[in-house]
Image (cartoon, rainbow, N blue to C red):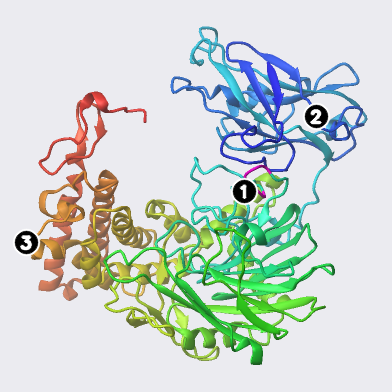
Amino acid sequence: MILTPADGSHGSGPRGAATEPHGARPVRFDAPADAPSAAEIPYARLEDHPRLHRIAQGDVLRWMIRPERGSAADRTFAATHAAVDLELSDGTRLSDRDPLDQYGMRATARGQGEGRHLQLDQWNDVQVDLSHLEGLTIVGVLLVTDPPVPGGADADGGPEGERLRGWIEPPRVGPALALPHLDDPVAWVDTRRGAAGAPGLSRGSTAPVAALPNGFAHVLPLTDARDRATPYRHARAQAAEGGALPPLQGIALAHQPGARPDSGQQFTLMPLVTRRPHGGPRERALGFDHAQEVARPDVYSVRTAQGTALHAAPTEHGMLLEIVFAPGSEGRHLLLEGADSRSRFDLAGALFDGAFTAWADGEAPHPGGGPARRLFAAGTVEPLPSHVEDAVSDGDPGLLGTARVMTFPPGTRRVTVRIAASAIGLEQARRTLAQQLLGRTFAEVRRAAHAAWVPRLEVIRSDSASPAQRRTLLGSLYRMNLHPRALHENAGTRQRPLLQHASVRAVPRAEATSSRTAAPLLPGPAYADLSAPGSAGTLWPAYSLLYPALAGPMLEAIAAQAVDPEPAAEEADAPAEVAGVLAAEGALGALAALADAHARGVPLADPLGAAERAVERLTAVPAAARRGEEEPVDCAALRGWTDARVPGSVGLDLARSVADDAIAQMVERALAALPKDALGDDSRALAEQAAYLRSRAARYALHFDADLGLLRARTRDGGFAEDLEDVNPFA
């Protein structure tokens, strides 16, 4: 085995990460893939080496490992068969004591590989309790590999002659971190879970947002203010050349973070501590240590290395941000900007009463054509700024021309910002600001957010779970409860709410103004399930099981949006691009989820009415077909399959088949629940349509390739899209 420490230069560390998760220089390992091997792990600093450390009760061995993927022929994930081993003062090794990691897997090289829980090309955190070795002294720290042997007892081993490679952070030994109290489930959630991963493996959204369950707005820290897909990465370095600390470039109030059509709808705030208000992302960045960071559902807080601290607590539509400037700060400024130049900030009023307003457009146009959606914001700041101006730059190309800066008097220590967002307009944003934030302290806002999360996280008791299991469970419940995202706003008062929402499906016929949306306003609640089109098979069954009282109203609201005939028809006319497919799959998934919830006994206000509207949606003739045209997304309505020109055409047709069958069954159940004397001609017609949908649900079989036993995309003329020799069934 060859171990080579990274020298700290750009490109010397692991591919896809400028630095590793905890700041120490990683070590590259290169070992034979056909035999066990071991080597002493080198440390850059002698004081970090645990040699001669006397193990105490509660000590934990912890390392980060990033095994690399081998060739396509290696189906054993050979590089995951690696682990740290300790040489002990009694002549034994840690591996002789059957150690277990935090997930109950054997913490030996062979045990880690056979556990199949380490991810390739990702940083993996491994922790081993050493309490059973109390009193022994560590005399050596080894990296051991023990891959399956080709042609031997492990008949499925990797290709002969291949090397086993990856990266490992030099391990640490010390007391285990203090555990939160069992009575506080919110404290067990670390919203940064998954943020250390490289983007090559999709875990869905790993943004460490603070928000209310199903909240309209999310509070999001930014380590790269110009990265839409992954604005926060745990291991992002201060500079491409390899800084030791990740940078904080802002705290955003986002309507939907991530690579979504409306992901540009965010407002970023960042303290500037230089004498001149340098606003470029790299110029304004403040390095921070993750040990000085708190990332929970109810709060995001960080103390930067410069000494300035930021504390943010969410409300349903906004946030309260407290900035505490370090005493030695040369300047005391507050930057406000959007995700890009499609945003505006009006700060003039802040000089007189602390009030400011803003708007930001989404990144992409409406899926059905028309202008992008617009998000509005209203806020207040304390104390009053002494003046406002445009941000300046000494050459940072990332500076936005629309970025604005508030400057506060010398000696200002604490700045408090309250900001609320609205998709309706500035008047509604001001109303929401008054309802949720004005007159409330940071502690009050955080307590309210904490109280909102407790019942969502306590729905499953985990008293007998290990700490790692409890964190996984509660972290998963947190991520699940961020979806679906509420779209409605309270146009009334806190005592007498009046819910309404700006339609996200109707295509705006005009540009929004600087104070109001151009989208139609609709009464009642609305939700957007942006977790992913395929989440209907996981998210909604979980809601039906765990939160049936919530699932029914949410699903009925989402399904009502999906069956709105005119916007849906226009949306189906969208170009054959990913946005159009996601919209179509999302609508179909909502209908299938509604039917599934009904089958599971989730109470619905009007099951038969919802089923009738769903049938109308599924049997509607696409607008393009009515005009005698043929759009690729609509091809299934004419031929029975979706044209291969549509990305994910097979998945889209599967979603259609699932929705057809699910709604057909829902109609049958709803009709069976009616008294016989209530059945009439309308009921019989509905039953016939349900029978048609049930038969149509079998159309997914048109994608079946009997020669391969797989579903394959078809072209417009009915042939398979790829030649048989080009198909890789293992891809």
Q: Measured along the vertical axis of the image, is residue 712 above or below residue 527? A: above
- Region of the chain picked out in magenta, as a range: 238-242
Q: Is residue 502 left or right of residue 15?
A: left
What is the chief secondary structure element of the magenta stretch? loop
Residue at 50 percent of width and 72 percent of height: 216
Residue 103, position as x, y percentages in the image: 66, 38
Report the residue at 38% width, 61% height from top. 597
In x, y percent, where is residue 590?
34, 61
The amino acid type, in three-letter code, at marker 3 is Gly
Q: Nearer the viewer, mark 3 or mark 1?
A: 3
Q: CA distance from mark 2 to mark 3?
A: 71 Å
Q: Nearer the viewer, residue 219 or 238?
A: 238
Q: Which residue is mark 1?
A: 472
Tell me the SS state at disc 2.
Answer: loop
Among the two numbered marks 2 and 3 on one chain, the one whose residue lies closer to the N terminus: 2
Kindly identify which residue carries mark 2: 43
Report helix, strand or loop for mark 3.
loop
- Asked if residue 231 lies in the magenta stretch, the reply is no
Q: What is the spatial separation of the Cα atoms under label 3 and label 1, in whole angstroms?
A: 52 Å
Give residue 93's position: percent from left, percent from top. Answer: 81, 20
Marks 2,3: beta carbons within 8 A: no
Characterize the local packing of mark 1: few (<14), some (14-19) or many (20 or more) Cα atoms within 10 angstroms. some
Q: Amino acid at mark 1?
A: Thr
Name the side, left or right, on which 62 lies relative to 362. right
Give the number of callouts: 3
**Of marks 2 and 3, the one in the foreground:** 2
Q: Earlier in the sequence, mark 1 or mark 2?
A: 2
